[in-house]
Image (spheres, rainbow, N blue to C red):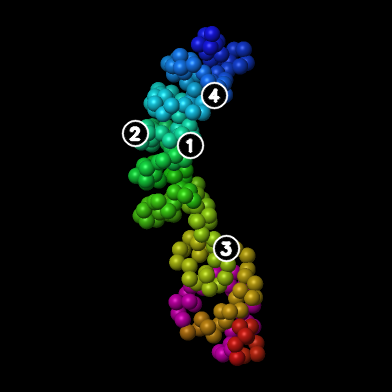
Amino acid sequence: MLCRLLGDTADGGDGAGPGWLAVRPELPDCVLETALRHPHWRVRAALAERPGLPAGTLAALAADRERRVRRAAAAAGHRVALPPETLAALAADRDPDTRRLVPGCAGLPVELLVRLAQDGSPLVRAAAVGADSWAQLPPRVRTALRSDRDPAVRSAVQRALRVERPLPVTLAGYIAESDPLRRERTAAGPPWSGRSASGWCWTTIRGSAGRRRAIRGCRRIWRWPWRRIRTRRCGSRCRCGRT
């Protein structure tokens, strides 16, 4: 009866559709096999959304001729660990919308993640950049992603860095920051308060050419009233508290 129902609801003629495959518990094996060989892609895609599906069945759906079925199989990999050969086949899929779902799969090997981070599609490269995956990428790949020509990829890098390590909140942290992208984002923020800048008076940095170069062009620093502390030595007008 259920096998005949698959043929009747493939096109959603009665309003039901094949979505019951994903939510109905404990279907017989004959129904799953019939859905796997069904000629309509909607039935096979609904089968891929079924929780607890065997890895062998997902591997067969990942090699389906219809790209929408392969996308559903790749999305199912976020819940179920797929075999390495299945992940490799999905990572090499000709459809970029399928490849961009692979970085979120459970148990993805590092070599596949590195390959996806260098994919020809910016959608795939942006999907491969995340707070958890950023630390697994080699330095040369990180450098290429930071200077990627696509703004979506650069935005993904910024989000990954924001989660990995907070931006500096003091002038000392800004000077010690070595990442140019993080320095640029820090400099574009709101002005620092007098308390955060008071520990770095002008007499502290006037003898260091490197520190002067570090703070040059930072709007957050030069918007602070440096005229009150720009003295040759700490005195009554200096806020650093030294004498």
Rendering coords of residue 44 (x, y %): 47, 21
**Over which residues does the magenta segment extend?**
208-234
Assess whether mark 1 and mark 3 are in contact (beta carbons under 8 angstroms). no
Q: Residue 85 carries which label?
A: 2
Task: Report whether residue 19 is seen.
Answer: no
Nearer to us in this view, 166 or 107? 107
Number of residues whose C-alpha sits closer than 10 Å to that of mark 3, classed few (under 14), some (14–19) or many (20 or more): few
| Discs 3/1, front | 1
Is disc 1 placed on a helix, strand or loop? loop
Q: Is residue 94 left or right of residue 167?
A: left
Assess whether mark 3 and mark 2 are in contact (beta carbons under 8 angstroms). no
Q: Which mark is residue 22?
A: 4
Q: Residue at x 50, y 56 (%)?
A: 164
| Location of mark 1 (residue) | 78
Task: Report whether residue 133 is seen.
Answer: yes
**Where, by quadrant of the figure, is residue 62 drawn?**
top left
Rendering coords of residue 142 (x, y %): 40, 54
Three-letter amino acid code of the residue under disc 4: Ala
Alpha-carbon distance for marks 4 and 3?
48 Å
| Location of mark 3 (residue) | 188
Picture layout, residue 54 above or below residue 135: above
Q: In which quarter of the image is the C terminus?
A: bottom right
**Where, by quadrant of the figure, is residue 16 drawn?**
top right
Rendering coords of residue 39 (x, y %): 45, 14
